[in-house]
Image (cartoon, coloured by chain):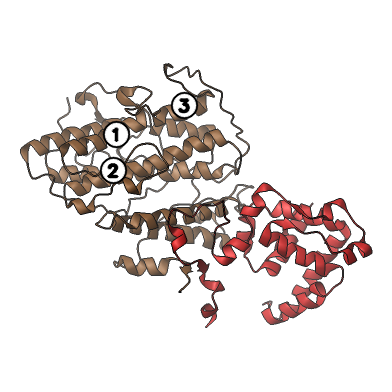
Chain colours: A red, B brown
Amino acid sequence: MTARSFERFLHLSVDLTAFRETELLGTGLAHHYLAKVRAACGDEIFADLLAAHRLARADATRDAGTCDRTLLDRALRHRILSDDTLGPVARNVIKLWYAGMWYGLPPEWTDRNGARAAAETSTVTAASYQEGLLWPAIGANPPGAKAPGYGSWAQPPRIEERYLKRAGK
Amino acid sequence: MTAPTIANRDDLISYLHTAMALEHATIPPYLTAYYSIHPNTNSDAAHIIRVVAVEEMLHLTLAANVLNAIGGTPDLTRPGFVPSYPAYLPDGEDDFTVDLRPFSPEAVETFCKIERPGTAHGASSRLVPAADSAKTLLVSSPTVEGMRFYSIGEFYAEIIEGLEKVAAADPGLFCGNPARQVGPEAFYSGGGVLKPVTDLDSARWALQFIADQGEGLDSGLYDDDGELAHYYRFRQLQLGRYYQVGDQPDAPSGPPLSITWDDVYQVKVSARLADYPPGELADTARQFNVDYGVFLALLTEAFNGEPTLLQDAVWYMFRLRDKINQLMRNPLPGSDWLHAAPTFEIPAPAGSDQHASLATGEVAQAVPR
């Protein structure tokens, strides 16, 4: 794995999860996840996924170099999520970051692209449950880990300002 | 022979402010080493550092109790309360500096120096001249310029003697409002106990307890409760074995400790915000410092008549923990593969109104019901 493909995997993950790069690296699991995705879908499809993401980014980039979020959303759906091969892998990358689990790819996918042992449902590391993005997304701690302090459960969940609807208004 | 440096209540108050800064100053170095350890590795070392760090928080609170008992006003938000690392300890020990280091032999060496037993025999040699007055000693003796202490224990011995003297001359010394005292319900997950301070006996107990838990009773291995002193806990990491009762200081004979120095995020030593290239990671590091400042303001409120706020402060600590972990797992660009770490450069409060800064400093807001 090259530093460049790691960087591209991170950029793809930022766009798929809506978490920042610092937060993704902050799980300590980005390298594990890259290795998992690659082993599950194979080098070729993995490279296609990163390439499709770069194209989607290019579609959404305006002349001034800024990214149009609406165009990006559309381009990601068009180039990745609606693609029969890349779509299921991309959905799995989202689930991987959020739940810390690799879910088996659907049978239609393996029929077409071949089955691999690494593609079956599995946990990545013992830490991946604790580091699932699902927990910060809902403002809760993973039950049984990252203890939030006695009595804190009586408080409403804490969601980062930028994720609240009122933030954009 | 050095003359006593504490003559009245004001001197005591200065010393106790220094004591609080001193206890706090040890915590960022311990936390940096503790959180640098990869999850699920080095459990012996992680446990030792964690317990010591939690007990330093107990010491900070006990010092606040003594300060409150004599009518002082604890303030963890004043400029300089958090030292700029690498720092000298606020009691003036100037033969070593304290860095924010990842878990490493160098870090453990520093921890042993922080917790080292005193050598002075009697009050006459407790205070020694500070070696280099040109360097910024944060505070040495807060009342006598150019003098410093050899160990934390000796610093506390000076305060205890001063307390006894001032209390004898001033029956009204312990005039603080008892409602400002923090009681045992606020401390868990560490050795020792939190007791309110209302008179000379309880003040003496609190200060002696701090000294004993750090360096051992009469420089022995164990304190009054049979708990191994911090200095010897850290020595175990250097000597590779646990102590058991009856051991000599240099020859622990308990089970071996397992340490893997490589299972550590190699964070930049005493990182500064200036080491961060502008961007998302720098913003995260800056936000941590803002959050830490807000946390210190919350502790200040808790120590000024609202002890129940300490429960909220514990929640705050756990959130700071998550932020530290996040930073340390990020490589610091431009630092030869070293990782990021919190810098503990606390910004000056935006306004004098603490409640205002509490509201604006936090990024994550509780969701309204």
Q: Residue B75's image quarter?
A: bottom left
Residue B97 is left or right of residue B284, and the answer is: left
Question: Circle 3 is placed at which residue position?
Answer: B235
Q: Would residue B75 be visible to someone looking at this image? A: yes
Give the distance between the C-alpha atoms of the residues marked 1 and 3, in whole angstroms.
20 Å
Q: Nearer the viewer, residue A139 or B115?
A: A139
Q: Nearer the viewer, mark 1 or mark 3?
A: 1
Figure check: A90 above or below B109: below
Q: Amino acid at mark 1?
A: Phe
Quarter containing the N terminus of chain B: top left
Q: Residue at x 60, y 47 (%)?
A: B338
How many other residues sit within 10 Å of disc 3, few (<14), some (14-19) or many (≥20)? many
Figure check: B295 above or below B7: below
Q: Residue at x 46, y 69 (%)?
A: B365
How many other residues sit within 10 Å of disc 1, few (<14), some (14-19) or many (≥20)? many
Q: Nearer the viewer, mark 3 or mark 2?
A: 2
Question: Circle 1 is placed at which residue position?
Answer: B209
SS of the residue under disc 3: helix
Callout 1: chain: B
Q: Would residue B137 be visible to someone looking at this image? A: no
Q: Amino acid at mark 3?
A: Arg
SS of the residue under disc 2: helix
Residue A103 is left or right of residue B90, and the answer is: right
Q: Using the rendered image, report if marks 1 and 3 lie on a common chain.
A: yes
Q: Using the rendered image, report if marks 3 and 2 lie on a common chain.
A: yes
Callout 3: chain: B
Question: Circle 2 is placed at which residue position?
Answer: B62
Circle nearer the N terminus (1, 3): 1
Circle nearer the N terminus (1, 2): 2
